[in-house]
Amino acid sequence: MHATLPHAEATRRFAGAIAALARPGDVVVLTGGLGAGKTTFAQGFAAALGVSADVTSPTFTLVHVHPTARPGLALVHADLYRLDRTGELEDLGLEELRRDGAILLVEWGEVAGDALGPALVVTLQHAHEPDERTVRVARRGEQWASRAERLATVVAAAGA
């Protein structure tokens, strides 16, 4: 599934629509080059969950944990860009946070390969115009299978 997002606000709205489908324990992996819109997506995703803090890329801290407006639900925003090896992933405690019911939103998640388990993989790329992005969405595993139809609707609406 893919769509073209004409500007940053469209990326945030698209991310918000994806967040509305997210459940505790979900993993959303964000991939794409530098400046492709991963953090912009994370901002829209977090806003839709009611995160009140500023959402910035956790490039140097690697992980930010944000409480959401949903009681007992946390958004874990990770950035794996600086990870040297997959073994360091375990040190971050992401799997434990996911098992505790947090939603994981992982920038540069391709660094971890399949180590993050079932996930929704969102790939952002620069398009023709400076703020325009193309987005590709794919499911890895069955975690999002029951929401596939609603997911397809969100992607189709974004491309309209």
Image (cartoon, grey):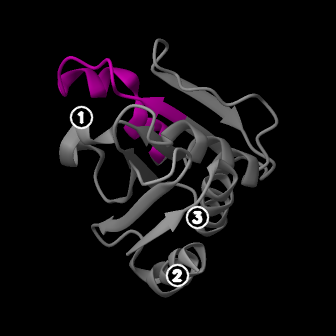
User: Which one is in front, 94 or 84?
Assistant: 84
State the image coordinates of residue 124 (x, y, percent, origin top left). 41, 51
Looking at the image, residue 16 sits to the left or right of residue 22; the answer is right
Amino acid type of the residue tagged 2 in the rendering: Ala
User: Would you say the residues marked 3 and 1 are in contact, meaning their CB atoms lie under 8 Å apart?
Assistant: no
Q: Residue at x 20, y 17 (%)?
A: 84
Amino acid type of the residue tagged 3 in the rendering: Ile
User: Which one is in front, 153 or 8?
Assistant: 8
Q: Residue at label 2?
A: 156
Q: Residue at label 1?
A: 111
Start-end of magenta stretch: 77-98
User: Would you say the residues marked 1 and 2 are in contact, meaning their CB atoms lie under 8 Å apart?
Assistant: no
Question: In the rendered image, is residue 68 in sight?
Answer: yes
Q: Residue at label 3?
A: 18
Amino acid type of the residue tagged 1 in the rendering: Val
User: Dot 1, how many residues are within 10 Å of its Cα: few (below 14), some (14-19), or many (20+)?
Assistant: some
Q: Earlier in the sequence, mark 1 or mark 2?
A: 1
Nearest-to-viewer mark from 2 and 3? 2
State the image coordinates of residue 36 (x, y, percent, origin top left). 44, 41
Compared to residue 138, the image places residue 99 above or below, namely above
State the image coordinates of residue 144 (x, y, percent, origin top left). 42, 72
